[in-house]
Every structure is written in C-alpha cells, then in structure tokens.
Image (spheres, rainbow, N blue to C red):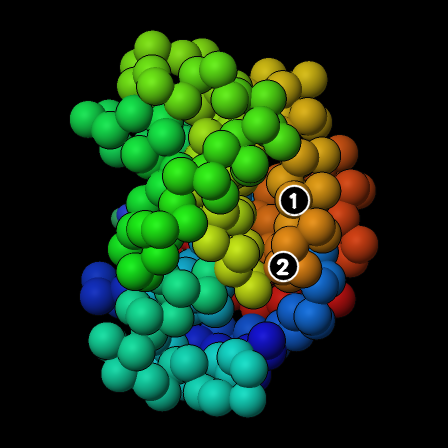
Amino acid sequence: MSARSLSYAFPDGTVAVSGADLTLGLGETLALAGPSGSGKSTLLMLLAGILVPAEGVVDFDGESLSGASQDERARVRLTRFGFVFQSSDLVPELTLRENIELPLRLTGRSGAAGDEARDVASRLGIEELLDRHPAQVSGGQRQRAALARAVVHRPEVVFADEPTGALDRESGRRAMELLLALSAERGASLLVVTHDEKVAGMLSRRVVMSDGHVEE
Ligand code: ADP
Ligand code: ADP
C-alpha cells in the first residue's frame, strides 16, 4: 500500500501529518520511528482508513482507501487489516478464545473460528489459557492474545502501534519475534510504530517521521 502527500489536522487545528509519503511493500516489515508527537500514530490511522486525510491519497490493492465510503473503509479494516496497540485492548467480558475468534465471527467465518483460534493460540503458547478472561492472565499473555486476534483472520496488513510499549524488555522482544513470525507465515505486511531502536532493528526497513512528514 502507499500514501502520497498526506496531510491531516485534528479538529482543534493541530496539524499532525503534513506532506507524508510512504510505501509499504507486499510482505514488507516496516518500522515507523521518530520523536513523540511527530505524527506516527496519526499516520498509522490514516493508512488504516481510521482517519481520512484532508489532502493526499492512500492506495491499497489498487484502490483509493482514503476516497472510499465509511462503510467500505470499515469493511476493509475488519476483513483485510489486523491491529495491535500498546495496551492489549481485549474485550474484558469475553474469554481469550472469544476475543481471538472475534475477527472471524464478525466477518461471517464462524465455522472456522474455533480451529483457527486454537491454531494461532498454540503457536503463541497460550492454548491452555483460552477459557480465561483477560483479567485472569498476565500482561504479556494478554498481549499474545491480542497478537493472535490481529492475525487470526489472515489479514493482508498488520498495523501495530507501540506493541511492546507496555511489556518488559524480554517479553517485548519475544512478542515482536512472534508478531514477525506470524506475519511472515500468513503473508501479511507489517507496519510497526515504535520509538524503541531494538524493536525497529528487528524489521526489514525503518523510516523516521519528523514534524508530520516521513524522512527516509
Ligand atoms: P503516542 O506517542 O503513542 O501517540 P501520545 O501520548 O502522543 O501517545 O497520545 C496518547 C493518546 O492521546 C492518543 O490517543 C492521542 O491521539 C491522544 N492525544 C495526543 N495528543 C493529544 C492532544 N494534543 N489532544 C488530544 N488528544 C491527544
Ligand atoms: P506520535 O505518534 O508520533 O507521538 P501523534 O500522531 O500521536 O504523534 O501526534 C501528532 C500530533 O498531533 C501531536 O502534536 C499530538 O499532540 C497531536 N494530536 C494527537 N492526537 C490528537 C487529538 N486527538 N487531538 C488533537 N491533537 C492531537
């Protein structure tokens, strides 16, 4: 996917992204680095179709995502993208299994949900925890469940915003290794917003944001 000349200002007038260009190749793993406030999270939301740019275009699979209707963008996000955030963001009322199955159930693939969820959970070493609720497992285990949920529906692009930010160094490294392995196995491209040089070094390419734009 690619972005050309993206600009975005929040309703209060803060210009968060200004003239940003970025290309994410098929199967590529890309680190988006740069200082706090440089526009990384906002650019991720523009690329993922959560926000719509005031100027510029986001292309995904030969179509303009930024020009698509709200319903179409929601459909693309749900079926073709996966998301990981700093805090694992699981639904507290649901078990880990139900959380991991969500993307499949929401896209009408409930039939395969049980098997797919178990496969990816076992790959992440949380198979024994599937009947627990998020509050009943550790932070690292919650983040693994969030990784499972991000890839279970075989998305084409996984967007991760500081995915290791709430983990200690060793759990963070392990979570990144798993995220990289799962993305590769499933053929997904991966965009990781991070200010951690160690994390950035694990990805195939690194770009730096400064003041709302991307400096290669
Ligand atoms: P990050 O570096 O991960 O973007 P921040 O601390 O900058 O983390 O932002 C945390 C949250 O606060 C985000 O959801 C962001 O959208 C929001 N936020 C950041 N700056 C502002 C602001 N000036 N006004 C309102 N919300 C903000
Ligand atoms: P980063 O992820 O690099 O920390 P962000 O994309 O979160 O940067 O923020 C870019 C700029 O936009 C910052 O100046 C931040 O304060 C501002 N910002 C972020 N979220 C909001 C918001 N919801 N409302 C207003 N300003 C925001």
Residue contact between numbered discs 2 and 1, judged by CB atoms under 8 Å? yes
Question: For the residues marked 2 and 1, what is the alpha-carbon distance in whole angstroms?
Answer: 8 Å
Q: Is residue 185 left or right of residue 86?
A: right
**Of the pair 207 and 210, the residue shown nearer to us:** 207
Asked if residue 31 can be seen in this view, the reply is no
Picture quadrant of residue 48? bottom left
Position above or below: 33 against 47? above
Horizontal relation, residue 60 to residue 103: left or right = right
What residue appears at the point 31 percent right and 34 percent down from the top-left corner?
98
Give the percent coordinates (x, y) of residue 110: 32, 51
Q: Quadrant of residue 7?
A: bottom left
Residue 59 x, y percent position in the rendering: 52, 83
Q: Could you say which is closer to the camera, residue 138 or residue 205?
A: 138
Name the residue: 60% across, 49% down. Answer: 192
**Crowd rating for badge 1 (residues with CA inside 10 Å; few <14, some 14–19, many 20+):** many
Which label's residue is closer to the chain start, 2 or 1? 1
Residue flagged by tag 1: what amino acid is it?
Answer: Leu
Q: Label 2 crowding class (10 Å Cα cut-off): few <14, some 14-19, many 20+? A: many
Q: Amino acid at mark 2?
A: Ala
Q: Secondary structure at mark 1?
A: helix
Residue occupied by mark 2: 188
Q: Residue at x 69, y 70 (%)?
A: 26
Q: Would you name the residue on which mark 1 appears?
A: 182
Residue 142 at x, y percent in the picture: 44, 23
Query: Measured from the top left, where is residue 139 in percent x and y?
Result: 45, 17
Residue 180 vs 118, above or below: the answer is below
The outermost residue toward the front is 111
